[in-house]
Amino acid sequence: MSWLRRHIGAFGPLLGLVVVFGFFAALGPASFSSVRNLETMARQTTIVGTAALGMTLVIIAGGIDLSAGSIIALSTVAVAALLQAGFDPLWAALGGVGAGAVCGLINGLLITRLRVVPFIVTLGTLLVVRGTAKGLAHEQKIDAPLTWLIDLLAALRPVEKWMLVPPGVWILAGMALAVGGMLRYTRLGRHIFAIGSNEQTARLCGVAVERVKVTVYGVCAGFAGLAGVMQFSRLTVGDPTVAVGLELDVIASVVIGGGSLAGGEGSVLGSLVGALIMTVIRSGCSQMGLPNWVQEMVTGGIIVLAVALDRWRHRRE
C-alpha cells in the first residue's frame, strides 16, 4: 500500500491533468483540442509556470512568497526602462531578472535576520515592490522599442512552425530541467528538502539553514523576474499594475502539483502540471462559454481538494 500511495502522490497531478483535458475535449467544442489552442495554452502557462519553478523551491523549504506578482510587475518596468534607455535587449532582460533576484535576497535576509515568518515579510514586500514599480514608472505604462523580446511568447508564424511552440516555452522547459536536476542531484537540493522536512534536525546535521533560505528566496524571485520578462513579451510595455494576485496562481500551481505547504514535499513536474491544469480549466470554460465566476469556483475547489488530500495523506503516514 505504501508503494501505491507514493506513486499516486507522484502521478496524481498528471492523472488529474489528463482527466480535466479529456473532460473538456469530450464536452467542449472541437477547437479546444486543436493544435492552435494547444499552442495558446502552452503560451498562457509560461508566465505562471516560470514563476512556479522558484515558488516550488520556497514551498519545499517550508516557506512562502507573496511578493511574486509584484516582482513580475517590477521586472516588466525594469525591462521597458532599460530598453528605452538604449540597452541591448539581452541586457534589459537580465536587468529584469536581476531586479527580481535583488528583491528575493532582501526577502531572505529579512526572514532570516529578523526571524519574522515568511508570510508577514513577503506580504509587506508585496506592497513595497509594487509601490517601487509604480514609482519608477511614474504610475503609468512605459513604452519600449520593439525588439526580439516580444517574440518570446508571440504566436508562431508559418515559417516558424518547426519550433512547435514559441521560444519562451522552450526556455521554461530548459529551466524546469535545470531546477529539477538541482533538486535531485545536488547538495543544495538535498538541503532544501531537509530544511522543509525538519529545520531543527537539518541545522543539527550541519546545514547552513540561513544561507540556504536566502539563496532559495533569491532564486525564487529571480524566476519571478524571468516571468516578468515573459509578461513584457506579451504586453510589449512595462506595466506596474500588471500581475495583481498572480502570486496566488503561482502558489496554487505548486499546491495542485503536490507541493505541501508544511514543507518538505514538491516537484518541478508537479508544479508545471498544476499550472497546466489551471490553464486548461480556464481555456475549456472560455471555449464552452462559461462565465469567469465558474472558472474561479472550479479552480478554488481544486485547490481546496488538493490541500485536503495532502493533509489526509500526512495523517495516514
Image (spheres, rainbow, N blue to C red):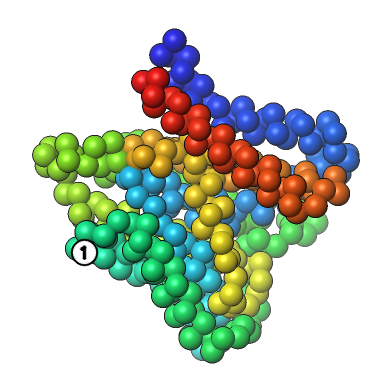
Q: Position of residue 203 (x, y in %)?
A: 14, 43
Disc tally is 1
Q: Quadrant of residue 102?
A: bottom left
Identify the residue at horizontal 46%, vertical 31% (top origin): 310
Q: On the picture, is 181 further left or further right than 85?
A: left
Q: Nearer the viewer, residue 317 or 253?
A: 317
Q: Position of residue 13 (x, y in %)?
A: 56, 32
Q: Is residue 278 above or below residue 258?
A: below
Q: Position of residue 146 (x, y in %)?
A: 66, 79
Q: Quadrant of residue 114?
A: bottom left
Q: Nearer the viewer, residue 316 or 216?
A: 316
Identify the residue at horizontal 17%, vertical 36% (top origin): 201
Q: Furthest residue to the top?
A: 1
Q: Quadrant of the N terminus?
A: top left
Amino acid at pointer 1:
Leu
Q: Is residue 305 above or below residue 95?
A: above
Q: Quadrant of the C terminus?
A: top left
Q: Furthest residue to the right?
A: 29
Q: On the picture, is 187 further left or further right than 155?
A: left
Q: Is residue 104 above or below residue 128?
A: above
Identify the residue at horizontal 67%, vertical 30% (top origin): 18
Q: Position of residue 58 (x, y in %)?
A: 37, 50
> Does dot 1 land on a helix, a strand or a loop?
helix
Mark yes or no: residue 75 visible: no
Identify the residue at horizontal 53%, vertical 71% (top origin): 73
Q: Nearer the viewer, residue 28 or 172?
A: 28
Residue under label 1, please give it. 114
